[in-house]
């Protein structure tokens, strides 16, 4: 760098010397005062070049000290020195913040791992050693998928979709410890992976599932008895009791349906997979239309749209349960005179089953929660139509077991469309239609 400054200075000096030579020659020819003025200007310009050379060398040296005095040159030397001090203070603050972050992250009970864009480990805290079995400094630079060997984790990391956490992952150091993994992208292609011990939460969740399943099972028998005795009572013997008997029968049937739905949910939650076979979708849609017409009693215009002849690979019983819930919801929540359409189609190679209605619609604020158990957009409307608040939860669990998802489009006062979107790998070549 110093050589460049010297060469640039020498070139400028030779150019200035040429100009000075011409000026001196003109001054000598003119004679008198003009010659001395030219000589003085040349001297001042030479001093300026000399000072500029020293200033350039000082800037390149990075030194913060200077012996230069004078108002102008002293100010010029102080400007870079001031900037250097500010930059140094900023770097010190950044270093302090980085140390504070590492100290805080190291003290977190959750395993925290910093990954680069390719999945290599840049840094991790002490909890990562305890929960993930990472070893410092040996595992720095290693690929996370190679160190934490799990097909589920590998697929999740490679998918690029980290909007949802990966739950119930066995810890590499102990299978009894269950982890929840979450990835937070930040900076330039870097990712922050957080692993939390979910063992106690998973145990509590299992206790809840067992409790719901056991209580639902125990309630089934007494409800069956109550419902049976209510059917034996003849309202003709006591006409004044007829409204009461009708209400008792309606509520007992509703309670029985809630128990059955809870048992269905418990069974679905306990399963990791379902037996699969070809599902004839043409026959499925015909069956769903008949069920909808029986529930509607002629109050709605119900149609089917079979826009593709492919079939679906899945569990016929569970898929029928999920589709039937969507169709019955459309019938219940669509006013008389409304339209309901049941569709089966391909969208970008993905098979899609959808149900559209012209019902009351759902406000956007409710859409994220409609698949929760017992969540009601309107409690009075749900009770009036006989809903249990569990239908969409069943739909969600059935779709999860088929690696599918539920998409909801709704506008208040216009209607709703519930779409079950399956992966392209579940497409089957069409066969002769058979009604289930």
Image: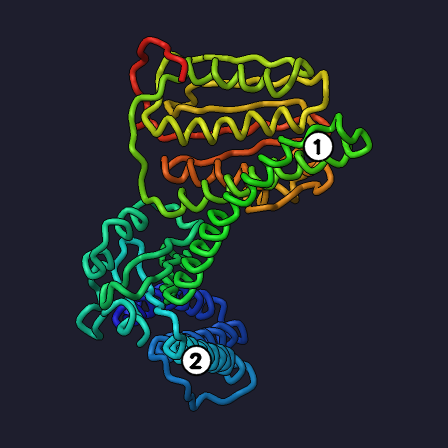
**Badge 2, how many Cα within 10 Å: few under 14, some, many 20+?**
few
The mark found on residue 231 in the picture is none
Q: How many marks?
A: 2
Residue 50 location in percent, x, y? 39, 78
Which residue is pictured at 43% across the width and 18% down the height? 284
**Figure quadrant of the N terminus:** bottom left
What SS does tag 1 mark?
loop
| Label whose residue precedes the other's in the sequence (2 or 1) | 2
Q: Work out how far the residue at label 2 is from the one at label 1, CA to CA, in angstroms.
A: 50 Å
Residue 408 location in percent, x, y? 56, 33
**Badge 1, how many Cα within 10 Å: few under 14, some, many 20+?**
few
Residue assigned mark 2? 100
Residue 389 location in percent, x, y? 60, 41
In depth, the one of 324 and 155 nearer the eye is 324
* Relative vertical location of residue 226 with respect to residue 341 in this rendering, above or below: below
Residue assigned mark 1? 412
Question: Could one spot residue 141 in this view of the protein?
Answer: yes
Q: Is residue 121 left or right of residue 304?
A: left
């Amino acid at each position: 760098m110093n050589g460049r400054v010297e060469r640039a200075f020498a070139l400028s000096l030779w150019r200035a010397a040429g100009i000075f030579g011409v000026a001196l020659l003109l001054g000598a020819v003119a004679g008198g005062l003009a010659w001395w003025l030219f000589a003085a200007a040349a001297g001042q310009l030479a001093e300026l070049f000399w000072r500029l050379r020293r200033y350039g060398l000082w800037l390149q040296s990075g030194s913060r000290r200077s012996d230069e005095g004078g108002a102008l040159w002293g100010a010029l030397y102080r400007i870079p020195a001031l900037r250097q001090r500010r930059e140094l203070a900023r770097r010190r603050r950044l270093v302090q913040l980085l140390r504070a972050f590492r100290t805080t992250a190291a003290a977190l009970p959750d395993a925290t791992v910093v990954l680069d864009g390719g999945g290599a480990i840049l840094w991790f805290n002490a909890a990562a050693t305890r929960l993930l079995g990472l070893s410092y400094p040996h595992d720095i630079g290693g690929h996370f998928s190679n160190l934490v060997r799990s097909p589920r984790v590998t697929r999740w990391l490679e998918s690029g979709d980290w909007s949802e956490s990966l739950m119930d992952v066995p810890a590499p150091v102990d299978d009894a410890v269950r982890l929840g993994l979450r990835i937070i992208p930040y900076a330039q292609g870097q990712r922050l992976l957080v692993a939390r011990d979910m063992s106690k939460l998973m145990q509590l969740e299992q206790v809840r599932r067992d409790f719901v399943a056991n209580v639902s099972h125990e309630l089934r028998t007494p409800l069956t008895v109550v419902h049976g005795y209510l059917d034996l009572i003849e309202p003709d013997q006591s006409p004044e009791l007829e409204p009461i008997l009708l209400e008792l029968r309606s509520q007992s049937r509703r309670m029985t349906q809630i128990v059955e739905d809870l048992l269905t949910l418990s069974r679905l939650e306990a399963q990791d997979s379902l037996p699969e076979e070809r599902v004839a979708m043409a026959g499925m849609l015909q069956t769903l239309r008949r069920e909808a017409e029986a529930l509607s009693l002629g109050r709605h215009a119900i149609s089917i749209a079979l826009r593709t002849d492919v079939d679906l690979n899945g569990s016929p019983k569970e898929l029928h349960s999920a589709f039937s819930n969507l169709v019955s919801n459309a019938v219940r929540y669509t006013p008389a005179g409304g339209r309901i359409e049941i569709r089966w189609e391909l969208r970008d190679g993905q098979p899609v089953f959808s149900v559209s209605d012209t019902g009351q619609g759902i406000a956007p604020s409710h859409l994220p929660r409609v698949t929760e158990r017992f969540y009601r957009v309107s409690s009075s409307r749900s009770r009036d139509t006989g809903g249990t608040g569990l239908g969409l939860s069943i739909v969600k669990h059935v779709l999860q077991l088929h690696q599918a998802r539920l998409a909801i489009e709704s506008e208040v006062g216009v209607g709703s469309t519930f779409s079950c979107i399956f992966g392209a790998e579940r497409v089957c070549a069409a066969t002769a239609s058979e009604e289930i």
